[in-house]
Image (spheres, rainbow, N blue to C red):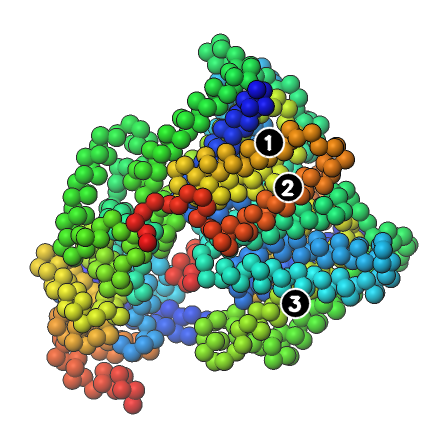
Amino acid sequence: MSYILQSIFNGLLAGCIYALFAMGLTMVYRVLNFVNFAHGELIMWGAYLLYLFMGDPFHFPLYVALIPALGFTILLGLGMDWIVFKPLRRTNRLTLLIAALGISFFLRNGAQLFWGAELRTYGFEIKRGWRLFHISMTANQMAIILATLGCIIIVYLLLYRSIIGKAMRAVSDNLELARVTGINAKKTIRFTWIISSALACVGGILLALDTNLQPGMGMINLVKAFAAILLGGVGNVWGALWGGIFIGLAENLSVLFISTGYKDSIAFGMMVLLLLLRPRVLYGSQE
Amino acid sequence: MIETKGLSKSFGGIQALSNCTLSLKGHAITGLIGPNGSGKTTLFNLITGFLPPDSGEIYFKGKRIDGRLPHEVASAGIVRTFQLTRVLPKMTVLDNMLIACPRQTGETLSSLFFHSNTIRVEENQNRKRALELIEWVGLSHLKDQWAGNLSYGQQKLLELARALMANPTMILLDEPTAGINPIMIQTMMELILKMKEWGMIFFIIEHNMDVIIELCEWIFVLDNGEKIAEGKPKEIQQNPRVIEAYLGV
Amino acid sequence: MDLFLHLWIMIFIYSIFAMSLNLEMGYTGLFNFGHIAFFGIGAYTSALLTLHQIPFALAFVVALVASGFFGFLLSIPSLRLRGDYFGIATLGFGEILRMVFQNEVWLTKGPMGLPGIPKPILFSYRFATLPQYLLLTMGLTIVTFLILRIIIRSPLGRTLRGIREDEIVLMALGKNAFHFKIKSVVIGSVFAGLAGVLWTHYTTFISPGDFTLSETILVLLIVVLGGKGTEWGPLMGAFVLIFFQESLRFLKLPTEWGRYLAPLQQMIFGGLLIFLMIYRPEGLIREKGEGR
C-alpha cells in the first residue's frame, strides 16, 4: 500500500516536470503552429548550463548559477527562432520540421561534444527528508514541487494579467486578425519563445535534480511533452498542465505492472492510444 | 438532387448555419448567395463531408450522405471546387487532370506488375480525354507546365476542367469567377453553360450578381446561417428581405 | 581494395534505405522521422531467424513482411492526422523500438548484441566474400530502384504526389488519401527492412546502439541532400555522404579523438540539414518539371 502511495507521489512529481515541458511546447505550437522538435534540446541544454555554471571554472552556488543558465537557454530559444524558423516561416511544413529536427540533432551532439555521453548529476547529497503518511520525500523533491507551483503561477499571471499575454492569446487565436488589429506579432512571438525556453530550462533542471543529466534526455522528453499536449488538447496551455501530470502518474504507476525498462515508453503508448481513439479529423479547419 | 433537413453547424459559439432546410430539385444550375459570413461555404463543407454537421440530415439522390467522408461523397458523384483555387502546384497541368480520374486500375499496387497492359490502355484513354478537356478550356499550350505557374484565372479554368474529369453527377462551384478579369469571367460562364448542355448539374456560390442572374434557374439566399429566401432570379432581385440583408439595414 | 568494396557495399545499402524514405517523404510528403525503426526490424528479424538455423531466403521474406506490417500498424493511428503527428509518432517509435531491443534480453541479448550472424545463402550459393556481397547488394539496389520507379511513374505514384501537394483536393476528387498514405508507408517500410537485412548480414554483428536517431538523421540527410522527390537523388546523396562518413573511419586518427569526432560529425550533419532547409531545400538534384 505504501508502495502505491509512494508511486503516486513520484508520479505527481514527474508529472509536474512534464507539465512544464508540455506547457512550453504547446505555447509555441499555438502561436507558430508547428511542433518544435528541438524543444527537448532546450530542456537538455537548460540542465547542462546549470551544471556548467555550478562546476569548473565558475563554481557559482545554485541560486546564482540559475540566472545565467536561464538567460542562455532563453537566448538559445530566441536564437533558433531568429536563425532558422524565422526565414522558414512561409515555406512548407516539411521544410520547417526537418530543420527543427536538424537543430535538435545539432544541439544534442553539441552537448555530447562538451560533456560526453555519460550520466552526470549535480552532485547534491541527498538529504533525508520527511515522512508523511508512509511517503518519503527529499528536500530536492520538495523544491521541485514548489518550483513547479511557482512557474505555474507566473505563467498564469503572464498569460492572463499582462498585456503581452493577452496579445499572445489573441495571436494564437488568429494571427491575421491580430495583425489587423495592430497587435505586434513580432514582439508576441519573441515573448512566446522566452516563456517556452524558460519553462524548458526550469523543467530540465528539475528533472536533472530528480534523476540525472544525459545528452539524450531531450528527445525522450519531447515525446512525453507531446503526449501530454495531445492528452490536454493541442494548443491548450492548462490542458498541457493536466496532461503532463497524468503522464507522470501513468508512468510511475505502470512500474507496478511492467518492467521499469519500459517506463519511458508509456507516454508513447498513450499517445498512440489517443490517436486511435480520437474522433474524426476536421479537415476543413486544417488551415 | 441534394436535400438538407434542419442542418446546423457552429464554431466555438458562433452559429455558422442554423436549421437550414433546402431542396435542389430539377434545376440544372442552382445559385447560393448571401452576404459574407452567411454560411455558404460552411454549407458546401457540410454537403461534401469536409465538416460533420452538429445536427440535421443531408440527402443526395434520395440517399443519406451526412457522416460520410469527403472521398466517399465525391465518389457518390458530388465534386467541389474551392473558393481559393487549389491546384496541385508542383505537378503539370496534364497530371492535374489525370489524377482526377476515378478508380484507376494503376492505383493499386499489384496491378502495376500484373495488369500493366490494362493500365496502359486506360492511361491512353484518360490522357486523350484530359487533353480534350484541356483544349476545351484553352490551356493546351500549358499542358506540360507546373500548375503553380499558371495565372489565377487559368488555375480556375484548370480546376473546372479537373472537376469534370472526375466524372461527377454534380459539381459544386465555390465562387468560380472571384478574382479573375471580365474576359475570363465571360469564358468561365460560357464553359459552365456548355457543361449544362452536356447534362451537368451545378450548385454555385457566387458574389457577382450578373453571373448569378445569367446562369441560375433557381437561387437560395442565406443570411446569418439561415435561409431567408428562394426563388427564380427575378423574384429574388425584388425580394425585400434579400435587399435588406444585402444592404444591412 | 577492400576499403573500396566496403565503401560501395555501404553506399548501395544506404541507397536502398534512402530510396524507401524518398517514396514516403519525397513523393508522398510524409514526415517519417523514425525510419530507422523499420530498418531495425528487418535487421533483427533476419538476424534472429538465421541464427536459429532458418534458411536465409525464408528469413529474408519474413523480415520484409515484418517491416511492412509494423509500418502498417504505426500508420493507422498516426496518419489520419496532420503531418506533425506522424512525425512525432515515428520519432517516438524509433526510440521505443530501441528500448525493446535493449530490454528483451531473452530474445535479443539486449545491449550485448547478436554476434556471428551468418552470411546469406541463396540457392545454395554463399555470398561470403566482399566482391560477392557487393554483387548481391548492387543487384538488390537495382531491383529496388526499378520497382520504385515503376511505382513512381504509375498512376499510383501520381496520386501519391498529389497527396503531397494537397491532400484536401485529392479527397474532394474522391481519393481515399488515408489509404494511399498507408500504402506508401508500407512499401517504404518493406524496402527499409530490405536495407536492414542486407546490412545485418554484412556486418554480422548488431546491437541496439546501431539503430539510433543518428541513423534516421543520416538517411534523412541523404534524401534531402540528393534531392527529395527525384529518382536519382537518394543514390546521389548516399554516394556523397557515405563516402564522407566511411572514409573518415579509415583515416588513421588517434583513438582519443574518437570521443570528440563522433559528436562533431553528427553536429555537421545536423547543421547541414538546417543549412539545406534554409538555402537549398530542393537538394542537389531538382525535381523535374517545367517549373520556372
- The 10 Å Cα crowd at callout 1, few under 14, some 14 to 19, many 20 or more, is some
Q: Kindly report the distance in space between the C-alpha atoms of the residues bearing marks 3 and 1.
A: 42 Å
Residue B30 shows in this picture? no
Write the residue at 64% across / 41% down: C265
- Please give the residue where the numbered disc 3 appears in the rendered image: A195
Label 2 resides on the chain identified as C
Write the residue at 16% across / 60% down: B201
Q: Residue furthest left?
A: B197
Image-quadrant location for residue A255? top right
- The 10 Å Cα crowd at callout 2, few under 14, some 14 to 19, many 20 or more, is some
Image-quadrant location for residue B25? bottom left
In front: B33, or B177?
A: B177
Residue A212 shows in this picture? yes
Label 3 resides on the chain identified as A
Specify which label sits upstream in the sequence, 2 or 1: 1
Tag 2, which secondary structure?
A: helix
Write the residue at 38% across / 61% down: A284
Label 1 resides on the chain identified as C
- Please give the residue where the numbered disc 2 appears in the rendered image: C265
Is A126 on the left or on the right of C254, as rendered? right
Q: Kindly report the distance in space between the C-alpha atoms of the residues bearing marks 2 and 1.
A: 12 Å
